[in-house]
Amino acid sequence: METFNDDDQAQQLKDWWKQNWQPVLLGLGLSIGGVLGWNSWQAHKAGQAELASGHFEQVRLSLAAGNLEAANDAQQNLIDEFSSSAYAAQGAMSLAQHYVEANDYASAAAHLQWAAAEADDEKLAHIATLRLARLHWAQGENETALTFLTGSNQGAFASLYAELRGDILLSQGDVDAARRAYQDALALSQADDFAAAAGVGRADLQSKLDDLAPAAPATDSAAADL
């Protein structure tokens, strides 16, 4: 059996190092670089989020102070620099709320439409879409409102879409279609994670359905006696 003393082992290590030092150092460099790169990216993201938060806060404070021009400027900065952030969508919806209260429905719709189309946050996009539909409904634009409530990508908000669709259909006098929409909403509210977590008003939905229940057919008293 071949034996090795300390000198032999040291020489073997030197020989191995001569052959492998480049890949070893390269691998070590890539590992360290990956860690440093990840930390740098996380720091960049945190910095960007802080900047976006600052712009949104400016929107909010400007609206509270009645400075609509400053609010719109801050929102434009959000759109220009951080359009994919949740802050941009939240800023748009804050401005939309202001314009609704000022009876400027066209400007409100424009901000809601931007948020619905551009928000990366799915929850905010759905909220903006539902508010946009309600805004058109409030203006008597029922068919336009309904166009925002159709589609297959409603996710956990499907029950809210169906309920609002029922409300609009009922306001048009289409009782049967409204009943079907409420039935869909009630079924979806039992299945949707969001609806369950938010405690979507199943009692209210059931009440709406009960109000639309078809009247029981009249019973002929003579036949009843047979």
Image (cartoon, rainbow, N blue to C red):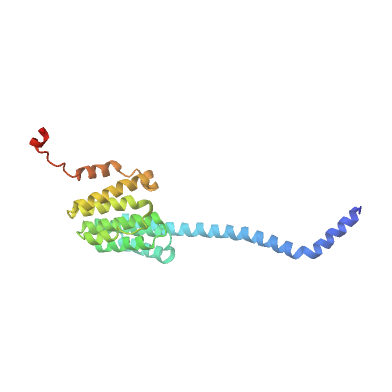
Q: How many marks?
A: 0
> Residue 190, located in which quarter of the rendered image?
top left
- Depth check: 191 or 54 in front? 191
Residue 109 position, x and y percent, is 28, 62
Residue 112 position, x and y percent, is 32, 60
* Residue 175 drawn above or below residue 77: above
| 52 lies left or right of 204 | right
| 176 lies left or right of 124 | left
Q: Residue at (84%, 62%) from the top-left corner?
A: 15
> Residue 4, located in which quarter of the rendered image?
bottom right
> Residue 125, located in which quarter of the rendered image?
bottom left
| 100 lies left or right of 82 | left
Q: Residue at (55%, 60%) from the top-left corner?
A: 41
Evaluate whether residue 70 shows in this view: no
- Depth check: 209 or 16 in front? 209
* Residue 25 drawn above or below residue 204: below
* Residue closest to the far bottom: 80
Residue 91 position, x and y percent, is 36, 58
Q: Residue at (62%, 60%) from the top-left corner?
A: 34
